[in-house]
């Protein structure tokens, strides 16, 4: 399957911040050094949030960045049937099931089949909890806080998943 295009278009990137830094502070450091410093700082903050349950507070904005856990609640319709459209899908197990159920079809043909079977994540290793990054902007006093958005990088999300699956995991996060 092809990956979709990015849904969030950025207006400013690290190169824009680098240009601002050079202009504002008259420091002539190479972009590679500036980029490495930013990446190392982001890794330090991310690791503190993941491993030490640190709530990172953005200065002057009163935004917080942390990790929280949540249990999926199974909802039922009027007939008592579970509503499963909000449950997360285990894509690896689902693909394996499709290859067993539809052995002579391609992936494109399988996708066109309505009501094809799916396997849902149960998160037994975390007792049904799902862990996610939480960007809290509602306690802030700044204007236009609705336009601020946080999306973690894949590397930091994988780092969180790796920690949750490790033997050192003691579940220090709060529940939402």
Image (cartoon, rainbow, N blue to C red):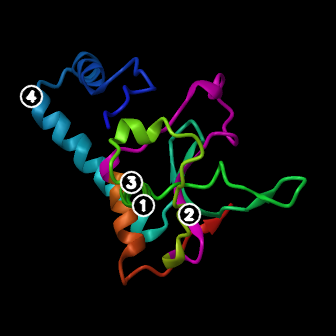
- The residue that label 2 is drawn on is 130
**SS category of the residue bearing label 3:** helix
Q: Residue at x 59, y 69 (%)?
A: 129
Q: Is residue 64 magenta?
A: no
Kindly report the distance in space between the C-alpha atoms of the residues bearing marks 1 and 4. Answer: 51 Å
Q: Is residue 74 visible?
A: yes
- The residue that label 1 is drawn on is 97
Q: Nearer the viewer, residue 100 or 56?
A: 100
Residue 157 badge:
3
The answer to whether the residue labelled 1 contacts the one labelled 3, judged by CB atoms less than 8 Å apart, is: no
Q: Residue at x 58, y 78 (%)?
A: 127
**SS category of the residue bearing label 4:** loop
Kindly report the distance in space between the C-alpha atoms of the residues bearing marks 1 and 2. Answer: 23 Å
Q: Nearer the viewer, mark 3 or mark 4?
A: 3
**SS category of the residue bearing label 2:** strand
Q: Quadrant of the N terminus?
A: top left
Q: Nearer the viewer, residue 164 or 119?
A: 119
């Amino acid at each position: 399957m092809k990956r979709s295009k990015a849904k969030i278009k950025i207006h400013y990137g690290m190169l824009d911040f680098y240009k601002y830094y050079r202009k504002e502070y008259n420091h002539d450091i190479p972009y590679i050094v500036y980029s490495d410093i930013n990446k190392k700082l982001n890794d330090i903050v991310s690791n503190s949030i993941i491993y030490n349950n640190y709530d990172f507070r953005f200065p002057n904005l009163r935004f917080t960045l942390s990790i929280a856990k949540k249990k999926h609640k199974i909802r039922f319709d009027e007939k008592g049937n579970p509503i499963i459209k909000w449950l997360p899908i285990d894509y690896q197990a689902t693909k394996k099931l499709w290859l067993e159920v539809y052995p002579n079809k391609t992936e494109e043909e399988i996708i066109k089949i309505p009501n094809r079977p799916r396997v849902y994540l149960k998160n037994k290793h975390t007792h049904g909890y799902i862990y996610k990054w939480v960007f809290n902007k509602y306690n802030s006093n700044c204007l236009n806080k609705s336009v601020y958005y946080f999306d973690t990088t894949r590397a930091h999300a994988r780092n969180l998943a790796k920690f949750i699956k490790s033997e050192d995991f003691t579940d220090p996060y709060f529940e939402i």
